[in-house]
Amino acid sequence: MCRDTLGRFPDLSVVEARAKALEHKAEIARGENPVGQRDAERASLRAEKTFAQLVDEYLNLHAKPHKRSWLEDERMIRRYLSSSWSSRRLSDFSRHEMVRLHQTVGRDHGHYAANRLVALLRTMFNRAKLWGMLKEENPVRGIKLFHEEKRERFLTADEIARLNQALINEPDWRWRAFFPLSLLLGTRRGELATARWADIDFQQAVWRIPNTKSGRPHLLPLPGTAVQILERLPSRNNSEWLFPERRRTLRSIRPQGLGSEFESGPG
């Protein structure tokens, strides 16, 4: 036998108490247990995961093991999401709230930032459903992203001339070689900055990039001018890296001939 409290007078009137009692009697007649059902619902709410727990699970189980850009995910969470989100249950978030967040970030920080944040939250809540942390629908699902204009910028002849002159006058051989190689090869900054000599094949004129954005290695053909720049780098046969950090063993190495190939370039 179990006992249930319908409410307390005067918060609950006599008429309301009678109506509730009749409702409970009907549920019991149908073989239901209103007290047990309510206790189960309360227990379910207590066991439901919070947003802070989702952030922790997402970063440690998904982002850090699988994404090289996981620090950017962490930065977006800290920058754009209120600290009050941490203690909220995942079922508390509504699609309307997410739409308003998207609009607010788009207005205050730009459409690109707002779209990246929505993409991140969509992934996080998808993971929450996959891991059994969320029973409801993904509140970020179906949010229409802002249109993003792709911007293209080309150097003028005067800018090219000034760039060439700045490279010629640059005292650090690393910068004198890094920028021309970047322009010639079109690779990501981090890929070139962490390039190893072991991945450069001068005989085949290719560079094997072991870790691209897609996570797969890539063979990049090297144009003749790029090969000439690489052959003259002081770090060749002296370091594991094309562009090593400043070290005592490399400070005494003088670059040989870097600069002539830029003087005859455009502009």
Image: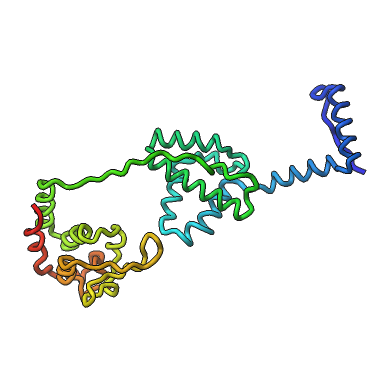
Q: How many numbered markers are drawn?
A: 0
Residue 38 drawn at (x, y percent): 79, 41
- For image coordinates 61% across by 44% down, the residue present is 137
Give left or right: position of 267 versus 110.
Answer: left
Please indicate, yes or no, whether residue 60 appears anywhere in the rendered image. Answer: yes
Please indicate, yes or no, whether residue 251 appears anywhere in the rendered image. Answer: no
Give left or right: position of 230 versus 134.
Answer: left
52 vs 141, nearest the viewer = 141
- What's the colour scheme? rainbow
Tell me the quarter of the image containing the N terminus.
Answer: top right
Q: Taking 243 as reference, is 96 above or below it?
A: above
Q: Residue 17 lies in what quarter of the image?
A: top right
- For image coordinates 50% across by 40% down, the residue present is 143
Residue 45 drawn at (x, y percent): 69, 44
Give left or right: position of 114 versus 191.
Answer: right
Give left or right: position of 123 versus 195.
Answer: right
- For image coordinates 9% across by 58% down, the residue present is 265
Residue 108 drawn at (x, y percent): 39, 34
Q: Taking 153 as reference, is 5 above or below it?
A: above
Residue 244 drawn at (x, y percent): 25, 66
- For image coordinates 80% across by 43% down, the residue present is 37
68 vs 220, nearest the viewer = 220
Q: Taking 130 as reference, is 102 above or below it?
A: above
Q: Residue 262 lies in what quarter of the image?
A: bottom left
